[in-house]
Image (tube, rainbow, N blue to C red):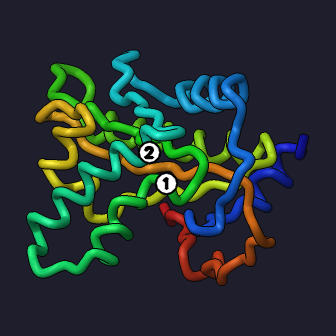
Amino acid sequence: MLDAIQLLQTRRSVKPVELAEPGPTADQLATMLTIASRVPDHGKLVPWRFIVFEGNARLAAGEAIAEAFRTRYPEANGEQVAFERNRLARAPLVVAVVSRARPHVKIPEWEQVLSAGAAAMSLVMAAHALGYAANWITEWYAYDPRVLGRLGLAADERIAGFVHIGTSVQRAEDRDRPALDTIVTRYQA
């Protein structure tokens, strides 16, 4: 297991098409989801939940994506529809992080949304800590009401991201990161 600083310094996003078997075991997935649920949550509202897509469920969910794509783009050819059908089958495991931020008398919705984002990032980091690669993405179908309904989201829920998890088929290269002097300022009293 990596030490915490090395873990944070070495995390990379890996394209879903570059994620292969093996994916996490059931126990590893439970560990990842437990870690993902240990995020700041002002008011203990649990303003997020998880939907796990594994095995054939990835293809079944892909049917909902393909149907919505055909409705949006009736001129789409079979190859394009097949690509959309396989969106959630590119990696061995996909977890949707669902934001269920709601109006609250004391807790701003924005804080609840940020908590869902923290859950998604913690899931990504937990996958990395267990030796897997991951990618947190949304893509068009995360915003399509037809797809969201078929995936079981309520009208007031939104996808914070789909986290694709598997074993990287190649070494993930780092990308350029911003220089600290371009993104950090110090408040002057």
Instruction: Measure the C-alpha gap from mark 1 to mark 2.
Output: 5 Å
Residue 8 against residue 182 in the figure, above or below: above
Point out the residue furthest to the front here. 78
Question: Seen from this angle, which residue lies furthest top?
Answer: 44
**Residue 11, quarter of picture:** bottom right
Determine contact: label 1, label 2, CB under 8 Å.
yes
How crowded pointer 2 is (Cα within 10 Å; few <14, some 14-19, many 20+) is rated as many
Kindly identify the residue that appears in the image at 80 percent across and 72 percent down.
171
Identified by mark 2, the residue type is Arg
Closest to the observer, 73 or 106: 73
> Depth check: 10 or 44 in front?
10
Q: Amino acid at mark 1?
A: Ala
Q: Where residue 62 sits: x, y (%)? A: 34, 52
The residue wearing badge 1 is 89
Mark 1, other Cα within 10 Å: few <14 / some 14–19 / many ≥20: many
Q: Residue at x 31, y 45 (%)?
A: 159
**How many marks do you count on the picture?**
2
* Residue 172 against residue 24 in the figure, above or below: below
Whether residue 10 sits left or right of residue 83 in the image: it is right
Q: Position of residue 93 (x, y in %)?
A: 57, 44
Residue assigned mark 2: 58
Image quarter of residue 149: top left
